[in-house]
Image: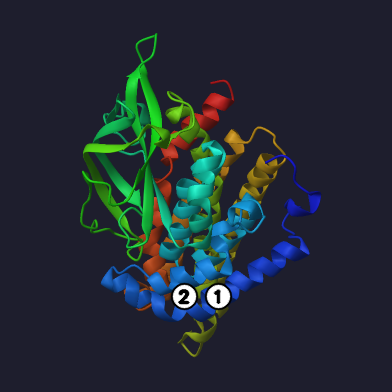
Amino acid sequence: MTDVDASDLPAGARLSDELESLRKTVEEFAHDVVAPTIADFYEREAFPYEIVRQMGQMGLFGLPFPEEYGGMGGNYFALCIALEELARVDSSVAITLEAAVSLGAMPIYRFGTEEQKREWLPRLCSGELLGAFGLTEPGGGSDAGATLTRARLDGDEWLISGTKAFITNSGTDITGLVTVTAVTGELPDGRKEISSIIVPSATPGFTVSKKYSKVGWNASDTRELSFTDVRVPAANLLGERGRGYAQFLSILDEGRIAIAALGVGLAQGCVDESVKYATTREAFGRPIGDNQAIAFKVADMEVRAHTARLAYYDAAARMLRGEPFKRQAAIAKLYSSEIAVTNAREATQVHGGYGFMNEYPVARMWRDSKILEIGEGTSEVQRMLIARDLGL
């Protein structure tokens, strides 16, 4: 995505008028629609279909895709702005959008044939269907090259067998497909040839397990998937044969910017809730925010959120200009995820005993924050990527 108008790029902490309008629209939706109902979904561990439907009507699932495929004609930074605003209120809804776009639809847009794009993207952009991305396996997370799922050509069909773990959006009533990485042969140097294959939902032999019992993100859908002699057309190969691993490494580079935006949203939400609580909760005859210990704690939370926002803005700008951005994406993802955990802990402390009660948003934020240091590349992997890019 190199043909981008300069007005679409982040300039410091300032947004263009168009992006600011998008931000305000999503902010209002998050506060008016998501905030009043999401706690109930979260505690029931139920997927918020009506919220997702409204997000589809708003065009959020199509933000970075061209209008010819049913998208909104925006870019990846617009998606990040929407993710930040959603995560200020709830991360389950935000990760549903992030995974559906950057992991579900984006691989088809980046690497799919014209026929694949025409078949899938309009329904993915509208939110009518959700897509998922099957990379992680029970025995291989950070070491994605340890893939054991296998696929072989049998006539004009792929025959797929294996298991995938921790797959977001994979078992909802509106999940339309999972793109699966599988070993399809052996390279001349003896390494595995890994390819990507589109598997539509309800394909015989494709089994979706019951939902995981999770610490956080409880209103999002996460499941284990198994493939037992699953047959799909040979034309369901996504991109070049043998390029599946490389394709999804590039998808994950982009996705780290989106996860950084989500982390910033959670961190900023912790500031929002702490300011609200500290100005209304009284102790010893005055608001607790009058105490320097509390005021400085909240000030430090704001510093972290602001700094992390600048990091993901920078990574997004580099990506949209067509410049190298792997290191900046890793920095943004690493920093935002770690400060999200810190801000969630500090916001809980500001709230005292109430922060430990699930009726308060900061309790949900505390539970949701930790996975940000794990998903789409652990903090350790981000440090490895940064060091490697520095030549170490």
Q: Is residue 156 visible?
A: yes
Residue 182 position in % (x across, y down): 33, 31
Which residue occupies the foreground of this view, 341 or 98?
A: 98
Q: In the displayed orientation, state which residue is furthest to the top.
A: 188
| Secondary structure state at the residue bearing disc 1 | helix
Outermost right residue: 6
Q: Say whether disc 1 or disc 2 marks the residue closer to the N-terminus.
A: 1
Q: Residue furthest bottom?
A: 285
Tell me if residue 85 comes above or below residue 290 in the rendering.
Answer: above
Asked whether the beta carbons under mark 1 and mark 2 sit within 8 Å of each other, the answer is yes
- Can residue 65 be seen at all in this image of the molecule? no
Position of 326 compared to 164: left or right?
right
Inspect the image, locate mark 2, and give the three-letter code of the amino acid beneath it.
Answer: Val
Query: Which quadrant of the view contains residue 264?
Result: bottom right
Residue for point 41% across, 63% down = 92
Q: Residues within 10 Å of mark 2 (few under 14, many from 20)?
A: some
Viewer-closest of 279 and 6: 6
Density class for disc 1 (Cα within 10 Å; few <14, some 14-19, many ≥20) is some
Where does the image place residue 185, in percent across and percent down from the top left? 33, 19
- Front residue of 254/91: it is 254
Residue 180: x %, y % from top left = 36, 38
Residue at horizontal 53 percent and vertical 28 percent from the top: 387
Furthest residue toward front: 155
Q: How many marks?
A: 2
Which residue position holds label 2?
A: 34
For mark 1, what is the residue? 29
Q: Position of residue 338 (x, y in %)?
A: 47, 50
Q: Quadrant of residue 353?
A: bottom left
Q: Residue at position x 40%, y 37% from top?
A: 236
Q: Tag 2's secondary structure?
A: helix
Name the amino acid, label 1. Phe
Q: CA distance from mark 1 to mark 2?
A: 7 Å
